Amino acid sequence: MDIATGLREMHALDLVHGDIKPRNVVITATNISKLIDFAGNGFSEGYHAPEIHDVISRDMPWPKSLDVYSLGVLLNELLRKSDECSSGELDYQKLHRLIMACLSDVASDRPSASQVVTTLKEIGRAELCGN
């Protein structure tokens, strides 16, 4: 939820992170997740949207949908981890639908970061793996 909220705020300022992946997420001592590394060096293998190569080759401005795809990959990894250690109530079907929407091959079909935040609020903040 923290990462999606931060992404929503960035996108509201027309900023694209460009490299959302586990290594660029830190968790503070008060258990808040934060995005780091805004160098804009590009998407890491396995976390980039299918259209990234076209965006780069055409020297286009990076659309926000690229970040949403990467967030979907990250959420998918968290969902797989939560299957092993969930201790709270979580609407897995709704979360799975959200992740699949974020991972759409069609960029225009992906939700906005704001829509992701809204859906995550509807799903609830389950306590996963002690976090």
Image (cartoon, helix red, strand yellow):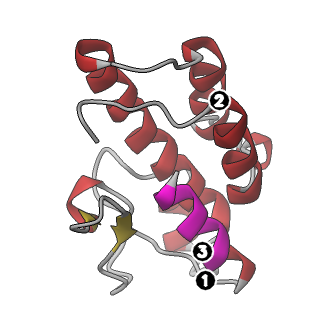
- Report how far apart the C-alphas of labels 2 and 3 lie in the structure: 29 Å
- Magenta segment boundaries in residue numbering: 2-10
Task: Measuring from the top left, give residue 128's x and y in whole percent.
Answer: 33, 30
Label 2 or label 3, whichever comes before in sequence order = 3
Q: Which circle, 1 or 3, is nearer the viewer? A: 1
Q: Which circle, 2 or 3, is nearer the viewer? A: 2
Q: Is 5 left, or right, of 32 in this rendering? A: right
**Against 65, is 42 above or below?**
below
Residue type, label 1: Leu
Task: Measuring from the top left, give residue 8's x and y in whole percent.
Answer: 66, 67
Q: Secondary structure at mark 3?
A: loop
Residue at horizontal 38 percent and vertical 82 percent from the top: 40
Task: Measuring from the top left, give residue 68's x and y in whole percent.
Answer: 58, 53
Q: Residues within 10 Å of mark 2 (few under 14, many from 20)?
A: some
Q: Which residue is the site of mark 1?
A: 15
Residue at horizontal 45 percent and vertical 71 percent from the top: 18
**Against 93, is 106 above or below?**
below
Label 1 or label 2, whichever comes before in sequence order = 1
Residue at horizontal 50 percent and vertical 72 percent from the top: 56
Label 1 or label 3, whichever comes before in sequence order = 1
**Against 81, is 14 above or below?**
below
Q: Is residue 49 visible?
A: no
Magenta-span inclusion, residue 42: no
Q: Which residue is the site of mark 2?
A: 123
* Labelled disc at residue 62: 3
- Report how far apart the C-alphas of labels 1 and 3 lie in the structure: 9 Å
Q: Nearer the viewer, residue 55 or 126?
A: 126
- Report how far apart the C-alphas of labels 1 and 2 lie in the structure: 26 Å
Magenta-span inclusion, residue 4: yes
Residue type, label 3: Trp
Classified by dominant secondary structure, the portion drawn in magenta counts as helix
Q: Secondary structure at mark 2?
A: helix
